[in-house]
Amino acid sequence: MTDTTPRHGGNPLLDPRAVARQLRRLAALPQAPWLHADIARRMAERLGVIKLQPAVLLNWWGFLGDSREALSQAYPKAKQVWVEPTEALRLRSAELVRRSWWAALMGGAPAIEVQAESALVPGAAQMLWANMVLHAAPDLPTQLRRWQAALAVDGFVMFSCLGPDSLRELRPVYRAMGWGAPLQDWVDMHDIGDMMVEAGFADPVMDQERISLTWATPAALLKDLRLLGGNAAPLRFEGLRTPRWRARLEQALLPLAGPDGRLWLSLEVIYGHAFKAAPRLRMAQEVSLSAESLRSMAKQGAKRPA
């Protein structure tokens, strides 16, 4: 029998230690993962339904989200604050901002700041943008509450993330070979919508899109998947793999080829947006009255004219 108990104390869907290692590796890349700019463009096409023009825009995980161009075109007057989860990513984003400082100055664009999440002023932003971030959150409810706290009342959040059907073609391949989980599980969009309401967001709107990716060879497929992040499943194989195992994996991936001979995998991309609701006034659940107060109220009622 397979033990399905997570080997860490966090979210059972993914291992935070693996996510931390992936973030360190991705921070050293010359550019963000290749897919993210395209998803940012697709998400920006949905901004037409939002009429609010933010003065301060939080770009969550600015380097890895690769959304600068999309956001600058949509909100050229907004001040962008890139919020990074680690020191390595803050340094990486700061480097990008320095390189583009002169171009921004000449174009009259507002400066971009890079901050840690702990340095944010609560309620100071009108918009929070998070491209391809949420599926890597070790604790989704906590992450959504942090987003809600960072926004002003009536500010809005817009995000994208991977859904549970992403790369599903890999699961039967690994299962047939007895290799454990090839990737972590991801949360369904309806569950994310429920979590947003619980976090204090109003009227969340969720949508999904399915994208097909193709590669000429198994080696090219595996290289691109590594550039996207990696396997953070708690029950993944954590030891070192041998070149012989890699050759077996590439052979096992060959049946994924379509009629044109190219290997293909599918992605489910989830898009969502919602507004921060005004805080609700809490009513007392109980009202306590003394016996004397009740007698006084009864006497006053008896004295009223019919």
Image (cartoon, grey):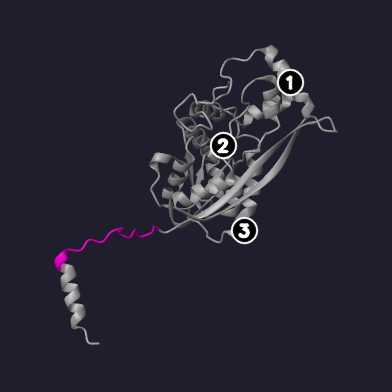
Is 273 rendered above or below residue 131? below
In percent of width and height, residue 163 lies at 62, 40
Q: Residue at x 43, y 44 (%)?
A: 146
Q: Are marks 3 and 1 in contact (CB under 8 Å)?
A: no
Label 1: which secondary element:
helix
Specify few, some or many for label 2: CA neighbours under 10 Å numbering under 14, 14-19, or 20 or more: many
Q: How many marks?
A: 3
Q: Is residue 282 magenta?
A: yes
Amino acid type of the residue that numbered disc 1 sits on in the rendered structure: Glu
Of pointers 3 and 2, the one earlier in the residue sequence: 3
Is 255 rendered above or below residue 122? above
Quadrant of the rendering where the C terminus is positioned = bottom left
Q: Which mark is residue 64?
A: 2
| Residue located farthest toward the right when viewing the structure as drawn | 259
Q: Which residues are magenta?
A: 279-292
In percent of width and height, residue 82 lies at 49, 42
In percent of width and height, residue 204 lies at 54, 54
Q: Are marks 3 and 2 in contact (CB under 8 Å)?
A: no
**Front of the two marks 3 and 1:** 1
Q: Is residue 282 visible?
A: yes
Q: Which mark is residue 250?
A: 1
- Viewer-nearest residue: 98 or 189: 189
Q: Residue at x 30, y 59 (%)?
A: 284
Q: Is residue 83 magenta?
A: no
Q: Residue at x 61, y 26 (%)?
A: 181
Quadrant of the rendering where the N terminus is positioned = top right
- Viewer-nearest residue: 156 or 62: 156
Q: Residue at x 18, y 83 (%)?
A: 303
Q: Is residue 57 visible?
A: no
Which residue is disc 3 drawn over? 48
